[in-house]
């Protein structure tokens, strides 16, 4: 299998098969990232499509010494998601939102679907950069330097954003997290 | 390599309880510190439930998306310059404003060109020979009386 550099050189020369290979290799990761950022299929499809269109039209702007293809594509997708979320007035744009309304916590232990719904809601309540940082760190396994490159920030700023994101999620998901701890405690005993 | 307690706390608060997500260059020192320190272990435990919950949110791949992406790219790469100009001029957007501002901008171009040309070219009118005073003098010599029928 050809490496990313060979494929990108071929795409730059207009090789459609090389393009197909890169799409097949990275599409699922890009679409999962966009879905977790935006929470709906329609916007996810638009972002994925635009990201790979830019791969086709701007392959020459990729530099192998700066970032891998995956990092470069996630950077494009990240910027497109941020642009889309900023057009949507309901999106949280401030970085400094640490006080979350936890709502009415159900008395009984929530089942997995309820926990997932609560998690999705908590993620969507996070400011967009915190959401992006936690998704790239937890689900995509990028290094801190790669995430900093994707988000165009320093590693120190990334750590600050990630810490705020985790604090925000913990504050919003108190009841769900305590139910997981209780389940773990029951399984261990 | 030693790890400062404050740095360990910062790593856990930022990257969570899973060592594979910690910064690679600091991981060995952080793991050594974790093994030897009970406070560090309880801090990691306090973040593990959040990581477990995040693990539960798995997203299915969009199976038809790959074909869709390839088809759309083929359409764009085969489109002519004229198609691209029309695409730019009348973008496919749900916002009504997007349909108007670009055609309006294009409609203003002849006006802007006229202003530019008018400012920079005299079109045979030699401004140095007919100063403002000369124009006034010529006007004063005119016979404004209505001609007799």
Image (cartoon, coloured by chain):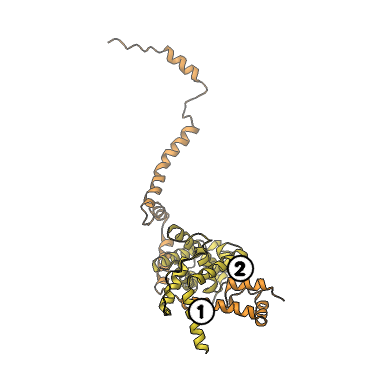
User: Can you see residue A176?
Assistant: yes
For the point 49% across and 32% down, the residue is B121
Left or right relative to B121: residue B100? left
Q: Colour of chain B?
A: orange
Q: Quick check: B60 left or right of A8?
A: left
Do we see residue B61 in this rendering?
no
Q: Residue at x 47, y 35 (%)?
A: B117
**Could you say whether the residue bearing mark 2 is in a helix, strand or loop?**
helix
Nearer-the-camera pick, A90 or A37: A90
| Residue A145 - label | 2
Report the chain holding disc 1: B
**Residue on which disc 1 sits:** B52
Q: Chain of mark 2?
A: A
The tint chain A carries is yellow
x and y percentages locating residue A82 in the rendered image? 48, 61
From the viewer's perspective, is residue B86 above or below residue A15?
above
Q: Nearer the viewer, residue B122 or B94?
A: B94
**Relative to residue A160, is residue B56 depicted above or below?**
below
Q: Indicate whether B138 appears above or below A12.
A: above
């Amino acid at each position: 299998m050809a490496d990313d550099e060979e494929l990108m050189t071929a795409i730059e020369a207009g090789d459609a098969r090389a393009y197909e290979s890169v799409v097949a290799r990275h599409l699922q990761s890009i679409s999962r990232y966009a879905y977790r950022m935006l929470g709906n299929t329609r916007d996810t499809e638009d972002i994925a499509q635009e990201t790979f269109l830019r791969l086709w039209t701007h392959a020459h702007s990729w530099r192998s010494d700066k970032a891998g293809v995956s990092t470069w594509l996630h950077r494009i997708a990240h910027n497109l998601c941020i642009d889309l979320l900023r057009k949507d007035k309901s999106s949280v744009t401030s970085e400094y939102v640490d006080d979350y309304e936890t709502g009415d916590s159900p008395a009984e232990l929530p089942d997995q679907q309820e926990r997932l719904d609560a998690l999705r809601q908590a993620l969507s309540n996070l400011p967009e950069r915190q959401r992006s940082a936690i998704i790239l760190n937890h689900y995509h396994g990028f290094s801190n330097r790669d995430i900093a490159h994707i988000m165009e920030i320093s590693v120190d700023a990334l750590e600050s954003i990630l810490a705020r994101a985790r604090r925000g999620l913990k504050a919003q998901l108190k009841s769900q997290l305590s139910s997981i701890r209780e389940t773990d405690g029951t399984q261990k005993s | 390599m030693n790890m400062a307690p404050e740095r360990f706390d910062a790593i856990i608060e930022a990257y969570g309880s899973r060592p594979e997500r910690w910064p690679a260059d600091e991981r060995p020192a952080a793991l050594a510190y974790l093994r030897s320190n009970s406070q560090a272990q309880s801090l990691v435990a306090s973040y593990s439930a959040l990581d477990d919950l995040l693990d539960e949110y798995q997203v299915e791949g969009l199976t038809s998306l790959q074909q869709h992406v390839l088809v759309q790219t083929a359409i764009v790469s085969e489109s002519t310059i004229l198609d691209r100009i029309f695409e730019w001029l009348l973008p496919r957007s749900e916002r009504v404003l997007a349909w108007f501002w670009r055609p309006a901008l294009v409609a203003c171009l002849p006006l802007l060109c006229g202003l530019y040309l008018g400012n920079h070219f005299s079109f045979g009118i030699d401004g140095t020979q007919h100063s403002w005073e000369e124009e006034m003098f010529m006007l004063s010599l005119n016979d404004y009386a209505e001609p007799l029928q």
